[in-house]
Image (cartoon, grey):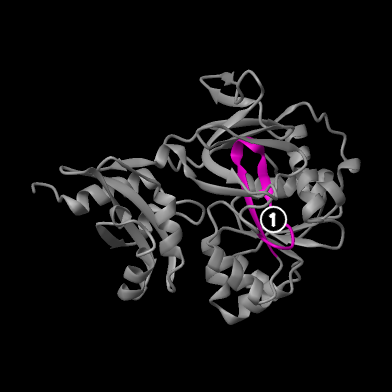
Amino acid sequence: LITQDMLPWLCTYQGDMFGQVGLADLDLDLTQEATLILTSGSTGQPKGVLHTLANHLASARASDQIIPFGQGEVWLVSLPMYHVSGLALITRALLHGGTLLFAHKDWRTALVQETVTHLSVVPTQLRQLLAQPDTAAALKTLSAVLVGGAPCPEGLVREAQAQGISIHVTYGASECASQITTTRTDPVGCGPVLSHVQIYIDRDSEILVRGDSVGQGYVTLGQVIPLVDEQGWFHTGDLGRLDDQGCLFVLGRKDRQFTSGGENIHPEEIERVLLAVPEVEQCVVVPVADAQYGQRPVAFVLGSPDRQAVCDALRCLERFKHPDHIFDWPRELSDAMKPDRPAMQQLAESLVRPAGS
């Protein structure tokens, strides 16, 4: 908890700017327990992840090797501080005395009107920024735009690059104090692993991570339950592969895969295809019960895509992967970071089979 009375001790403070303070200015015990971050809960009940200051520092130092950030530079805070992507900015700023800018009202207005050098966004936010001439122009002036929190469509990355934007795609986890892999100058997948961790893809294609930023455990009923197995690996629950250059490609969540008529379906595979369609800003695919096939995919789409364009895009997938229904996006069931998939699945069930039918 940071109060106004603490600000003169913690950092220089003027209006909405924190800056010009480094770790050397603070007397810190890096081994002490520092934060309790809730996971997104996008596939179930959120969990509290415990980190030490050392965990956050390891993450910040590894990020700094790819995206330097220090004195004279300003990182605009566009993500919530209760999320690991927002909270991680504090340690990055303290590493070399960088400045964090908290917008009074709308961070998009601050992006255009204030002096900014760095920005973190989720793919949906990036798509919205590119769609507006003033914010798209502002992105071109930044030293780095970090995109994470959800899979970033290749078409969106190429669009940003074509406009001269310095974009970095990242894959991370709350349990690992933010970034695990990050792309360099040429975004390929989610990029190679950062220096503070190791990655291993097991025989079931699950992504395993170990290293200095992995948290101490999940806090449950006053007890800390370790995150890692006996060999120190954290099992992310994400499926992925590494290419010949060591770049990570995330295929989807292990617990989101479902079976339809004996065939395995990864919702993320269908989502990637739909997100490549012009005018599709965001989409989520969930399974609904089906008497004949067991489960069938249903999609929610944000935007106004051409119906024929959607049909044409889906042709690259096997027919059994085509959604049976495509519904309008339920704005009341999502936030800026991650959609509430369990709630969307319940909504899909009610739309496909209304009460009493």
Residue 82 visible in the picture: no
Q: Is residue 152 magenta?
A: no
Residue interval drawn in magenta = 167-187
- Given the image, on which type of amino acid does mark 1 rest? Thr
Who is closer to the viewer here, 59 or 315?
315
Percent x, y of residue 49: 59, 31
Give the secondary structure at mark 1: loop
Instruction: Tell me the residue that label 1 is attached to.
Output: 183
Percent x, y of residue 281: 45, 67
Who is closer to the viewer here, 137 or 256?
256
Direction left: furthest residue: 357
Quarter-wise, where is residue 15 in the image?
bottom right
Judged left or right of residue 218, residue 302 is: left
Residue appearing at x 19%, y 53% in the figure: 352
Direction bottom: furthest residue: 133
Residue 206 visible in the picture: yes
Q: Is residue 180 magenta?
A: yes
Direction right: furthest residue: 24
* Vertical relation: 81 (above or below) 58: below
Who is closer to the viewer here, 141 or 7?
141
